[in-house]
Image (tube, grey):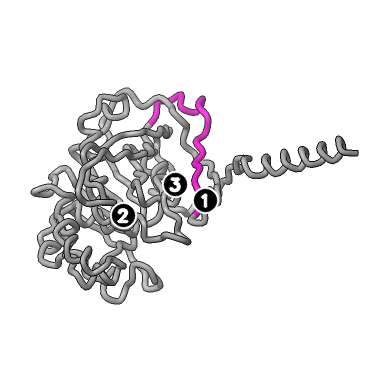
Amino acid sequence: MKIKSKTLCLAALLTISTQVTAAPVPENLYTQQPSITPELAHPGQYPVGVKTLQVVHEKQLNTQTFTSFEDRPLTLEVWYPAAANAATEELATYENVTRLHKPFSLIGTGHRNAQAQKTGQFPLIVLSHGYTGYRTIMYYLGEHLASHGYVVVGIDHTDSTTEDVDFVNSGFSGFPSTLVNRARDQQFVLDYFSQDDSAIANITDTDHAAVIGYSMGGFGAINTIGACYGFNQAGLQRLGFPEDAAKQLIPVFNSCHAGRDEVDSRWQAMIAYAPWGGESSVHDAKSMKTITVPSLYVSGDQDDVSGYENGS
């Protein structure tokens, strides 16, 4: 009788273990599009490859202490025009977690680790997620743009991904890092692909680059192309910073041009979807008037996070 009891317990444990560790089945979010779909909404002429890169941005400010510097690891998802035989590689799946840390998986149309095109120069586009988010949150856009002849790089902004942040118990934990690093991460990707010697980097035209940001990604993108941040003590306290920290961190947060002395002239376009900051006037108005990079702002009057009434 004891042996039977142990057997049942073991079977139950194995069942629970299987339920916990089983990977989610990839879902397909793509649908068949009608013939009236606008021309640019259709896939382009290139098969698409997908590759994940682990890179390091050296000697960046430690946003836990604000008194030291440390290497900042970043995970990148890269979509690129692939060689004609790309279809022989497996379709890419994108695994991540929700804000409640529930795992999910989506299947795309790109091909994992497919060989890149051997010739040609394809402009670089950087995709920057919100708070919180993840590098593949706009995978559909990354795949689509790559099919039309772009190298597209989605960033996992370290400290502010859905995996990094316990949104229920410590939702603010990654926000200081976000304020400091969002634009700097975007600029780093451009610099990285300018210096790298990989097969993908060799077909990337970094002299013609664009950045697309959603929410906090848009907040950073506006800074990257020329705006300065204009935080003040009262605004930082409203965001949850203690009084003393708010006073001391103003010069840390109020940077321009992704931390550079001037805008990188290789940025040729910017799109900001629901950019955060307008409601709190965190982008200095005078500096925004000097922006010359062609820009598109997309916002909605039902946005209750970034806001709308006073400019998003």
Q: Are marks 2 and 1 in contact (CB under 8 Å)?
A: no
Q: CA distance from mark 3 to mark 1?
A: 14 Å
Residue 150 appearing in the image: no
Q: CA distance from mark 3 to mark 2?
A: 17 Å
Name the foreground residue: 5 vs 27.
5
What label does residue 69 carry, if any? none
Span colored in magenta: 82-98
Which residue shows up at 53% across the image and 48% down it? Answer: 30
Q: Which residue is mark 3?
A: 140
Looking at numbered disc 1 in the image, what kind of residue is underneath it?
A: Gln
Q: Secondary structure at mark 1?
A: loop
Which residue shows up at 81% across the image and 38% down it? Answer: 6
Image x and y of residue 12, in percent: 76, 43
Mark 1 Cα shell of 10 Å, populated few (<14), some (14-19), many (≥20):
few
Q: Does residue 139 belong to the magenta stretch?
A: no
Looking at numbered disc 3 in the image, what kind of residue is underneath it?
A: Tyr
Name the foreground residue: 302 vs 67.
67
Q: Is residue 214 left or right of residue 208?
A: right
Image x and y of residue 94, in percent: 49, 41
Q: Nearer the viewer, mark 3 or mark 2?
A: 2
Sequence-first disc among 3 and 2 = 3
Sequence-first disc among 2 and 1 = 1
Q: CA distance from mark 2 to mark 1?
A: 29 Å
Sequence-first disc among 3 and 1 = 1
Q: Which residue is mark 2?
A: 217
Looking at numbered disc 2 in the image, what kind of residue is underneath it?
A: Gly
Q: Secondary structure at mark 3?
A: helix
Which residue shows up at 51% across the image and 25% down it? Answer: 88
